[in-house]
Amino acid sequence: MAQADGGRVQALLRSEDKVLRRWVEAAETPLRGRLTTGELERTCSDLLAVLGEAVAGGGLDVTSAAYAGARGFLAELSRDWARRGFSPSETASAVFALKDALFAAADEDGEGGESGGDLATVLESSRWVDALGLVTFESFARAREQVISEQAEQLLELTTPVVKLWEGVVAVPLIGTLDSARTQIVMEKLLQTLVDTGSEHAIIDITGVPAVDTEVAQHLLKTVVAARLMGAECTISGIRPQIAQTIVMLGIEFGDITTKSTLADALLHAMRGTGVEVVRRRTGSR
Amino acid sequence: MERVPVLSLGDALLVSIQVDLQDNTVLALQEDLAERIVSTGARGVLIDISAVDIVDSFIGRMFASIAALSRLLDAETVVVGMRPAVAITLVELGLSLDGVRTALDVERGMKILRALSDRRGLPVADELDDDLVPVAEGGGPAAGA
């Protein structure tokens, strides 16, 4: 069986214009106009050219060295589409549309009596396109994963700033759900800032934390105790009414840790701790 | 075996740990401290651990037991300069060092000790209220009051 030489597929690809036109037609439908016809045509014709070379050099074995260019092109294509928000099935069906084009081309050739639209040709080209589809899908998934991990990293960096509020008072406004990994980063960053700035007061503001469960509370307590071990006082602020209810219902004990409802209260508390008193200037001429 | 030097500074003892802590170093330090507190009559112990970057549960407990024994000998312990990584490790080990005072650096630690000894210090005579009479030996009012 002529599985590896790809003679039939090569013959089909030779009628490039016909295949290309059908391919673009078939691929356009699932993309629902998210890509212009011109752009899709350009992509398809580039891909077809690369594939033509690959088949000539390496037959139908997509893992062979001759396919390096084609694999690279597919990987680049799916990475690009993944970043542009195309769904996996949209990306894969664009490649699988080549199958329709090849079948149609084979059918036509069969009618013309040239090479014959026989079952072997259909099977061969089907297997080949499936393999190409798998390559596409793999790189699509890899690209997606990469995007997700990059975003997670950015989120971690974005949401853990330690700000100086006053001489000797630093604060971390926590935003988003707290998990172990984030708490670890927040904790280390806060403690390091305490050392670097010589601050004796730290405020952890949890206004932006959507929910507090026993695990989150545990993380907060650990941070406060660690700050104490280093010789700094730590206040928790921004406890919303619902969260206060949850904490009481869960039976979480904050012990002798100072908690305030707003960041302003916590700042005032910390400033008093450093010996600063805030007074309002008397206005008017009396 | 390396010994950690214990320096006497006013009515406080200063211990600056600059070496890698081994279990027996720590045990020796504990003995030395107990002896020095008694011999110098120190009222405060300041332990600087800013150079310590690795602790285990044994050393963590050591800080607590040093604090406990110095309190027995009427001296307060202040641990200063703990690094973030060390603090996190101790918390993860479940050692919150209750009863040990902490400060960010030696200067702040000394301030705490000074504040403590001021509070405990015997009042000077003219600070006493007029109707208070110093107790004489034997528990009765001083003669001539």
Image (cartoon, coloured by chain):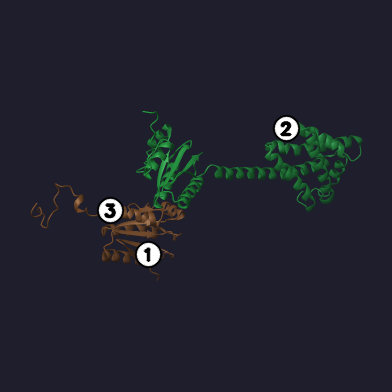
Chain colours: A green, B brown
Q: Is residue A200 shown left or right of residue A56?
A: left
Q: Residue at left 84%, top 34%?
A: A21
Q: Quadrant of residue B106?
A: bottom left
For label 2, the residue is A34
In the picture, the quarter occupied by the N terminus of chain B is bottom left
Locate residue A22, reporting x and y percent: 82, 34
Which circle, 1 or 3, is nearer the viewer?
Answer: 3
Given the image, on which type of amino acid does mark 2 rest?
Arg
How crowded pointer 1 is (Cα within 10 Å; few <14, some 14-19, many 20+) is rated as: many
Q: Quadrant of residue B121?
A: bottom left
Instruction: Tell me the element at label 3.
Output: helix
Q: Assign a secondary structure to mark 2.
A: loop
Q: Position of residue A98 (x, y in %)?
A: 79, 38
Q: Amino acid at mark 1?
A: Val
Three-letter amino acid code at the position of disc 3 = Asp
A105 or A95: which is nearer to us? Answer: A95
Around disc 2, counting alpha carbons within 10 Å, would you say few (fewer than 14), some (14 to 19), or many (20 or more)?
few
Residue at 69% over, 42% down: A140
User: Could you say whether the residue bearing mark 1 is in a helix, strand or loop?
Assistant: helix
Query: Mark number for residue B26?
Result: 1
Residue A1 appears in the rendering: no
| Label 3 packing within 10 angstroms: few (<14), some (14-19), many (20+) | few
Residue A15 visible in the current orientation: yes
